[in-house]
Amino acid sequence: MNRVLVFHAENDGHSRMSPSAYYAETDLMPVAVRIYAERAPSANAKFDIFDDGVSIFTNTAAQLWNSSGVQIANAADTTIGLAAGQATEELAERFTDTIIDAGSWVYATIPTSGGGKNFTVILELEAIESMDSSD
């Protein structure tokens, strides 16, 4: 682990967490994410982390089919969560295979607070070494 990004929100949903964004100085690979709350939410809380506006988490939206067997389009759900009554979640890693490129801006949002308070989301990243073989 070469870099740790820490995001915080008091309790309001539908907003960015503080700080507003981090700048990636080098290529980074997400390794782990941890969620903590001072007061556990009474309903499920949801969080998302973005790399230049694209979520770093896989889409877990349910696939729906109509009676003719045609897939119905669903909105993407890339959020990770803190279940109702839980104050910590340390196994929220559902990362895509995407690398956070140098020069990217990384930020977190809290679409739904679930009534919890003082959330902290910690993203652990590993720097990707350059594979320069021209030595």
Image (tube, rainbow, N blue to C red):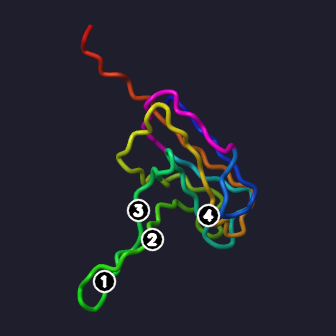
Report the front residue among 99 and 82: 99
> Which residue is pictured at 46% across the width and 31% down the height?
102
Q: Amino acid at mark 1?
A: Trp
Q: Quadrant of residue 111?
A: bottom right
Which badge, 3 or 4, comes first in the chain's sequence?
3
Q: Judge left or right: residue 85 versus residue 135.
A: right
Q: Using a 10 Å C-alpha cutoff, classify the residue at mark 2 as few (fewer than 14 neighbours), some (14 to 19) or many (20 or more).
A: few
Q: Quadrant of residue 43?
A: bottom right
- CB-based contact (under 8 Å), mark 2 and mark 3: no
How far apart marks 4 and 2 lie (CA) works out to 14 Å
Q: Amino acid at mark 2?
A: Ala
Q: Label 3: which residue?
A: 59
How far apart marks 1 and 3 lie (CA) works out to 17 Å
Q: Is residue 123 above or below residue 73?
A: above
Instruction: Judge depth for marks 4 and 2 and give the one in front.
Output: 2
Q: Label 4: which residue?
A: 111
Q: Using a 10 Å C-alpha cutoff, classify the residue at mark 3 as few (fewer than 14 neighbours), some (14 to 19) or many (20 or more).
A: some
- CB-based contact (under 8 Å), mark 4 and mark 2: no
Q: Is residue 135 above or below residue 37?
A: above
Which badge, 1 or 4, comes first in the chain's sequence?
1
Q: Amino acid at mark 3?
A: Asn
Does residue 20 show up magenta in the picture? yes
